[in-house]
């Protein structure tokens, strides 16, 4: 049962081949047996899972038949879950039990999903390798010495190792798409505002977006259907009708215009990955797509702009963690100032502290105009580049990451080297566009992803292209040895 996709589980439950309770018990046993190798979970929620599975079976017995009814998933550990630890991968929130459910959690629970647990992540979603977690790094099931990507690395590792069929993630600069690429999964970052951020603990509010991680585009369509929609609790949520994503999967790609930016194939890209990307272009051409070279001239400025804007927002968002209201508090503070300093110094890890300091500096008097304002202007130029490109093409295609997964610890002493792994993904967050990564092959036994970007609210188009590609390739069916 552990090897089934979400779509196969839905069919199996509908045909009464097994119950949600049987499936849940099987997967919980598998997690207990295999996760010590991966460290992909921070918390397991066995009691809640069995309770939800029994409830789902009862609903099916009464005639309900939703695609997610009885489907086991896990949530990245920054989605608030009522009464369950929501740690954000940080010592700061190690003792925090959320008093309410995030909108994503509540919507998926209402659809009948079964929550198996909360997955490991970079601390406060700040990282590209899942190495900054207070609970230790998650490991890539394709090679346990390598990172699974970040910050949604726990979700990616768990799904790739067949511990569960799908999981939620969040993407601030590529944190769904990059781990999907490094673990041979399909990962989708929706349009900014498509999925509610209410109850999703913030890193950078204008960039964060929740989305699905699964093995196939078909599964991502099913999970996104349950996650998406307007939320009056979230001021950045957009009141736009949610289409039937599964219904658009089988459309023809005949005449689809795919743009390949020349800037994607510079010196920083592993030439073996470049070759696999060109192979995927040829495969889509055979399906009827028309390929065109395009330009995104301001892409070169994306990393410096992102690493000013995101830390600036983080420094503001994380000011609430002060040792007073909730979370970690230092012992025996001498006074209020000592309480603040020691609680934050002891509760936050080094990467979080680094980004808070960078952000506070960029927002400080005398530097706001020089750094933050300039970064926001570059952000607008990047968006304009995309708008111009989408006047010529329907989809933009390129690599998801410049390299395959690196060894755990290799980039720990050089944060900038890790930041450069986000070079292809962060532009979609700066512009608010939807993006998807899908499996495209292997380099030295390690998975490689191809990234697709589309105009606003065209998630269905991304899923359609990925599904048609996956009907004609088998990369997404490969399983890591031992799992």
Image (cartoon, helix red, strand yellow):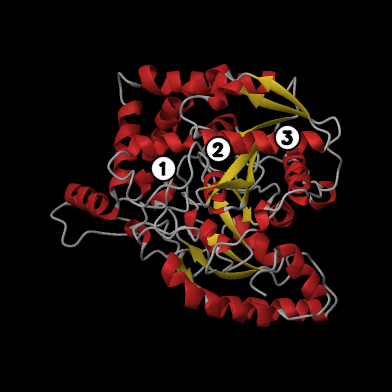
259 sits to left or right of 419: right
Q: Residues within 10 Å of mark 2 (few under 14, many from 20)?
A: many
Q: Which mark is residue 273?
A: 2
Confirm whether residue 425 shows in the render.
Answer: no
- x, y percentage for residue 404? 49, 44
Q: Quadrant of residue 416?
A: top left
Q: Which mark is residue 317?
A: 1
Read off the residue under disc 3.
282
* Above or below for 273 versus 2: above
Q: Are marks 3 and 1 in contact (CB under 8 Å)?
A: no
What is the spatial separation of the Cα atoms under label 3 and label 1, in whole angstroms? 44 Å
In this view, the residue in front, 304 or 228, is 304
- x, y percentage for residue 263? 56, 22
* Above or below for 435 versus 4: above
* Above or below for 250 versus 54: above
Q: Secondary structure at mark 3?
A: helix
- x, y percentage for residue 345? 23, 49
């Amino acid at each position: 049962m552990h090897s089934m996709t979400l779509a196969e589980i839905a069919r199996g439950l509908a045909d009464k081949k097994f119950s949600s309770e049987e499936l849940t018990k099987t997967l919980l046993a598998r997690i207990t047996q295999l996760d010590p190798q991966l460290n992909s979970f921070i918390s397991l929620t066995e009691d809640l899972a069995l309770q939800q599975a029994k409830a789902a079976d009862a609903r099916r017995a009464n005639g309900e038949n939703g695609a997610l009814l009885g489907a086991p998933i896990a949530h990245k550990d920054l989605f608030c879950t009522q009464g369950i630890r929501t740690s954000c991968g940080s010592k700061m929130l190690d003792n925090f039990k959320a008093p309410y459910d995030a909108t994503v959690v509540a919507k998926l629970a209402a659809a009948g999903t079964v929550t198996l647990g909360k997955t490991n992540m970079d601390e406060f979603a700040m990282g590209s390798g899942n190495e900054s977690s207070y609970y230790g790094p998650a490991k890539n099931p394709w090679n346990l010495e390598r990172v699974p990507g970040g910050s949604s690395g726990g979700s990616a590792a768990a799904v790739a190792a067949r511990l569960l069929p799908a999981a939620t993630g969040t993407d601030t600069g590529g944190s769904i798409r990059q781990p999907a690429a490094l673990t041979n999964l399909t990962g989708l970052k929706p349009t900014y505002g498509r999925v509610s951020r209410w109850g999703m603990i913030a890193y950078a509010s204008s960039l964060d977006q929740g989305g699905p991680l699964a093995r196939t585009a078909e599964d991502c369509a099913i999970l996104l259907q349950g996650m998406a929609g307007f939320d009056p609790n979230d001021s950045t949520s957009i009141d736009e009708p949610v289409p039937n994503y599964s219904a658009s999967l089988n459309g023809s790609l005949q005449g689809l215009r795919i743009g390949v930016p020349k800037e994607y194939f510079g010196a920083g890209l592993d030439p073996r990955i470049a070759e696999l990307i060109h192979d995927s272009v040829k495969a889509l051409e055979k399906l009827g797509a028309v390929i065109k070279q395009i330009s995104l001239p301001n892409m070169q400025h994306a990393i410096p702009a992102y690493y000013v804007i995101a830390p600036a927002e983080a420094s503001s968002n994380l000011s609430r963690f002060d040792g007073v209201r909730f979370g970690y508090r230092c012992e025996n503070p001498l006074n209020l100032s000592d309480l603040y300093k020691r609680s934050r110094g002891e509760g936050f890890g080094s990467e979080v502290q680094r980004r808070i300091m960078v952000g506070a500096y960029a927002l400080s008097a005398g530097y706001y105009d020089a750094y933050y304002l300039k970064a926001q202007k570059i952000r607008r130029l990047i968006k304009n580049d995309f708008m111009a490109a989408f006047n010529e093409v329907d989809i933009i295609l390129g690599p998801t990451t410049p390299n395959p997964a690196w060894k755990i610890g290799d980039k720990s002493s050089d944060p900038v080297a890790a930041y450069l792994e986000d070079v292809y993904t962060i532009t979609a967050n700066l512009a608010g566009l939807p993006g998807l990564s899908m499996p495209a092959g292997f380099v030295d036994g390690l998975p490689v992803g191809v990234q697709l970007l589309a105009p606003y609210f065209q998630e269905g188009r991304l899923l359609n292209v990925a599904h048609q590609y996956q009907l004609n390739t088998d990369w997404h069916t490969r399983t890591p040895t031992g799992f």
